[in-house]
Amino acid sequence: MTATGISDNGHQNGHHHPVSGGPIVQLPTAFGDFITQAWTDLATGAEHLAVSSPNPPKDGRAPLVRLHSECLTGDVFGSYRCDCGEQLAYALELINEFGGTLLYLRGQEGRGIGLANKIKAYALQEAGFDTVEANEQLGLPVDARCYKAAAQILAEMGLHEVRLLSNNPDKQNRLAKAGVRVVEMVPTEVPSRDQNIRYLQTKKDRMEHRLSLDTHVATVPAAADTFDHEQD
Ligand SMILES: [Zn+2]
């Protein structure tokens, strides 16, 4: 690190975050045929993955964008302790249908505290604390995630205006600060379950997530009144 820090490279307000994109390749999946590109955060070494529909949005609207924070237990094992896995699947279904990009952000496990700490927080939750209190008990931030690299990747992909697939208004604010304009928030609420209702209630009450927690059908994006989200 230089003594002069990061302000002497010609960029203002910390908007520029160094990232490097690799080749774009095909990624056929259970959710549809996508294209994908790996991006390296040159400041942290974290490797992220952009998964995009091969065609631009049909209706000329801003592309759907999901910033999905890695959640090993939810994404890979389908854990019902959180709603990450179901939100990931739902976002991929929507992006396949309507066009856009899912940016899979690694190194953001447990809202940035890491996998081992997340499991420790689960142990505290089993002792009666909620997800916010558990992080506080561990002396860890409630949300340690940083979206500067994500915003820079979106900018370099030419995604300056997006329809953000998220229930989290804070994500919108953080992206705006990093220079990406969110023209619409598209909800990604998936049906709650007995195993995650307390977690989701905490996200709603203590982190201001926009969740109704009383519907059994995810809200449909404006362009797609007939889209049906199937839920097993
Ligand atoms: Zn999760």
Image: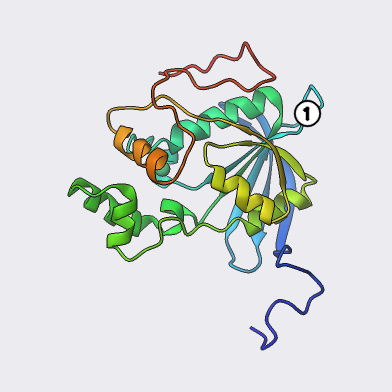
Decide if residue 193 is on the left or right side of residue 209: left
Amino acid type indicated by mark 1:
Arg
Q: What residue sits 51% from the left and 57% below the top? A: 145
Tell me, yes or no, if residue 147 can be seen here. yes
Give residue 135's quadrant in the image. bottom left
Residue 177 in the image: state x and y as whole percent.
67, 56
Query: What residue sits 32% from the left and 27% below the top?
Result: 193
- Is residue 3 shown above or below 201? below
Q: Check the image and name the residue furthest to the bottom.
A: 3
Give whichever of 50, 2 is nearer the camera.
2
Near-viewer residue (117 or 186)? 186
The C terminus sits in image quarter: top left
Image quarter for ligand 1 equals top left
Q: Does the residue labelled 1 lie within 8 Å of ligand 1?
A: no
Residue 139: quarter of image? bottom left
Residue at the spot of label 1:
61
